[in-house]
Image (cartoon, helix red, strand yellow):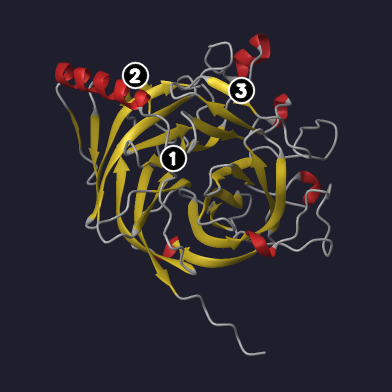
Amino acid sequence: MGFIRFRSRDSYIVSPLYFRKFCRTAFIACWLAVAPQAVLAQAPSPTPALPSLRLLGSATLPAGLMVENTRLGGLSGLDYDPATRQWLLVSDDRSRHAPARVYTATLDLDAQGLHGVTFTGMRVLRQADGTPYPDPWRYLWAGGDVPDWEAVRWDPLAPGFWLAGEGDRALGLPPGIVRMSPAGQLQAQLPTLPGFGVHRLRIQGPRRNLAFEGLTFTPDGQSLWVGMEGPLAQDGPAPTPDEGGWARFTRIDREGGMLAQVAYPVDPIPARPAHGRHADNGVSEILALDATRLLVLERAAVQPADGPMRNFLRLYLADLSTGSDVRGQERLRPGAFTPVTKQLVLDLTTLDTRLDNLEGMAWGPRLPNGNATLVMVSDDNFNPAQVTLFLAFEVTARAAPKEKDQ
């Protein structure tokens, strides 16, 4: 298969086979040669007191897309390498539709809009012994580690990339963070963080499908923040329409040592589902703005009496310096800690564009005027009723709101 280009108007072109095969082979060889990244993808500099986003455009991919004989879907994380101008995207496919994998792509993005997405490659993710990650059924008799990758970041200091996964509580697998080679081979699996182990017989640890969802490097590349989607079981209930919850954000060094941990306040679910229907809200991605602040994407899904889920998406700026360190607290008790503060950057439901299950977020290339770009991608859950959607924004500065007089 040659390169596949998808335009923002939902059309696509498959280019001639033989010429593209040659180009692809040459590109991959060059990409592997320059895999070490010199810098992190570009956040605004100097960092604004409060970012302001302007929607540049969107691109929706056709359903049922095939890239290198794999079904494209479940895109739960993305990151950009300014050295190679390549985007890296991870699927949260648990090796059911195809082996766990990442894709590379380029985005045709400028100040006038997002004009298209071109997929340039696919890599199967492999365990330490070189075998692909198993699906849950194969795991039961062959062992290994069942994948559920939710976030991906290029390594700013060495070749390769990092992944954060949710694990599987039912199978006794804790959430984890791994470092991969440029080709997708496991290089290191960090130790399970204290308090995040899975206990089948105790109400403790991460809930099913509410574990590690966000990952971001600090600006110096020496440490990472990993964000929970929702509260640990011992930290209280998951958000409801009446009450929010506490998600732990943990800073670790490159060997997995815990450096800090704070409590982030997740919003209540913004609407009530129909009777007997589902609703949830949680953190779907985090992204460093500077050494002490993160952009946090909260995503809610609310099921009406009929029709598809309704998505609510809000982007916040969290100030990590305002929260107390909760590493020593086995459970978060009201009054025993200070949560981080957050400010609303953008309520995405106010945009005049289609929304879906946005899960990935990353800095993109700078525009000619020097402003940064921010790109988000949605996870279609391999559901025909959903889409794989890219949103691109220009990032500018706006003044922080004035403190009210006491």
Residue drawn at (30%, 31%) of the image:
119
Q: In the structure shown, which secondary structural element does the residue marked by tag 1 occupy?
A: strand
Residue drawn at (71%, 54%) of the image:
262
Identify residue for label 1.
Answer: 78
Q: CA distance from mark 3 to mark 2?
A: 21 Å
Residue 264 in the image: x percent, y percent? 67, 57
For the image, the number of numbered tags is: 3
Above or below for 10 versus 239: above
Query: Which numbered tag is attached to residue 108?
Result: none
Locate the C terminus by quadrant. Answer: bottom right
Above or below for 103 versus 401: above
Above or below for 134 versus 215: above
Closer to viewer: mark 2 or mark 1 = 1
Q: Residues within 10 Å of mark 3 (few under 14, many from 20)?
A: many
Identify residue for label 2.
Answer: 69
Q: CA distance from mark 2 to mark 1?
A: 21 Å
Q: CA distance from mark 1 to mark 3?
A: 20 Å
First of labels 1, 3 by sequence position? 1
Identify residue for label 3.
Answer: 146
Locate the N terminus by quadrant. Answer: top left
